[in-house]
């Protein structure tokens, strides 16, 4: 196993950081690694906003559900889907690009592009001995984030990433069984087998929580997921995305 | 610079592979690395389909616009957004999760989840001396891909990834300027500066093509993008996604 694979397999989200800020050089290296990722047809349809300002971090932490580590960390990156520059390029080149950049296809491209870049950033940071945590919580209120970060139309903040020197290293949560996630030649057609894999995994997760909490918590993955998904959260998203002129057609 | 960062910065897409198949161990390691990535609220909303069958690869290559390397490689992975297991979990646990899994928010989550996993897979492969290329071209005809891979509703094939031992190593295309992609504290408000950065980058890209093609090609990035985006491609995507019961509300 090489050093890269060791880094990848060793990942865990870090939610408690030392009070030490990233250097400019560290930030530049992380962004350079993000930019080195593949990008669909060279479109480069994302932007990254770096936040150092304490007050701004505090507000973003509030939006994200008062998660302390969103305010207290070594640096906070916000990854955005971005077709703004492509809109301007259309004007610049005298080409009508509107239908294209408002399509569901291009919305998907921006999300995938931004996420690929973010994961490279995460790996770069972790390789430097830093820890990271993705912050989907900013999507609790993208109107507020937009106001705070002054993102124009055709730019959608997708998630944050806190980076910093770890204080507390968490356990790794076991993932779904390999066979359940990886299908050979075609999607698994045997529903009974598919459900049994989830049941088996439920045992694994239940034991994991049991051991970790000294018996206080034993919930299964399916119970956890069903409870989460029963709640209808962030249902304003369709309207928000379309108001910002993506995913319209 | 550590070995991980060297690997990340050294990325280039590989489009010509040796006729040597990945071992089962290599596939397992790549998928394990993909699964080690962060996942939004532990949702694990993606699946990976591995294709070895020559005939199937050939058909996927045709769909992707007759790209030879989609058929000829060491392995082909197809990354899918997947909320199928969450639908079944809703039934299993007697909870109504339908509105949630049909939301634009969860559609975004699946795309981000799948892309984060894919990028870890890419890095793992590259660290083993393998090369990769993302294949967005499968989105040319997702109906045909769905039929070929038998993906059920609530599963959307997003992109492929060819992996294998590289024959030809391409140059790296220079990326957008750091300052254009990375914004401090808020999104860049100075439109003139923003446009000037694109113009500067146009020079860089034009020179890159000029040198690479001995003067045969000199197009700028903005011209390339405007020409691409003027064409309305994959405009069936919204209908396809919604027919597969995602991004509905």
Image (tube, coloured by chain):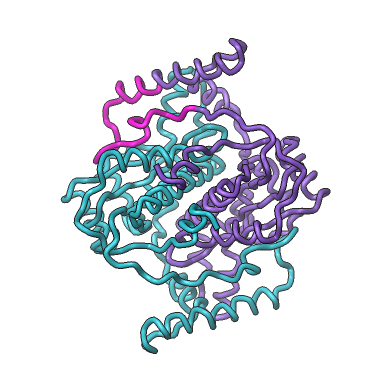
Chain colours: A purple, B cyan
Q: How many marks?
A: 0
Q: Residue at x 36, y 83 (%)?
A: B213
Asked whether residue A249 appears in the rendered view, the answer is: no
- Reply yes or no: does residue B217 show up in magenta: no
Query: In the rendered view, does A187 fall on the left or right side of A87?
Result: left
Residue B177 locus on image (x, y percent): 60, 71
Q: B128 above or below B176?
A: above
Q: Nearer the viewer, residue A98 or A24?
A: A24
- Reply yes or no: does residue A178 show up in magenta: yes
Q: Quadrant of residue A195?
A: top left
Q: Residue at x 35, y 20 (%)?
A: A196
Residue at the far right: name it.
A55
Residue at the far bottom: name it.
B215
Residue at the far top: name it.
A215
Residue B164 locus on image (x, y percent): 28, 54
Q: Nearer the viewer, residue A196 or B168?
A: B168
Q: Which residues are magenta?
A: A174-198
Q: Nearer the viewer, residue B64 or A18?
A: A18
Q: A231 above or below A149?
A: above
């Amino acid at each position: 196993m090489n050093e890269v694979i060791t880094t990848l397999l060793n990942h865990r989200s870090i939610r408690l950081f030392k009070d030490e800020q990233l250097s400019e050089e560290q930030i530049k290296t992380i962004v350079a690694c993000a930019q080195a990722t593949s990008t669909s047809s060279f479109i480069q349809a994302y932007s990254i906003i770096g936040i150092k300002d304490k007050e701004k971090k505090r507000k973003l932490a509030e939006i994200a559900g008062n998660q302390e580590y969103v305010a207290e960390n070594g640096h906070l990156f916000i990854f955005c889907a971005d077709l703004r520059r492509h809109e301007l390029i259309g004007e610049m080149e005298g080409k009508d690009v509107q239908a294209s950049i408002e399509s569901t296809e291009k919305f998907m491209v921006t999300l995938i592009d931004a996420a690929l870049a973010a994961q490279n950033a995460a790996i770069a940071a972790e390789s430097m001995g830093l820890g990271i945590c993705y912050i989907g919580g900013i999507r609790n209120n993208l109107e507020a984030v937009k106001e705070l970060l002054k993102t124009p139309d055709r730019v959608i903040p997708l998630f944050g990433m806190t980076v910093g020197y770890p204080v507390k290293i968490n356990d790794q949560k076991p993932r779904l069984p390999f066979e359940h996630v990886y299908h050979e030649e075609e999607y698994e057609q045997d529903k009974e087998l598919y459900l049994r894999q989830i049941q088996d995994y439920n045992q694994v997760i239940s034991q994991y929580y049991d051991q970790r909490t000294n018996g206080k918590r034993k919930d299964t993955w399916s119970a956890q997921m069903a409870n989460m998904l029963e709640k209808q959260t962030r249902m304003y998203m369709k309207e928000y995305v379309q108001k910002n002129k993506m995913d319209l057609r």
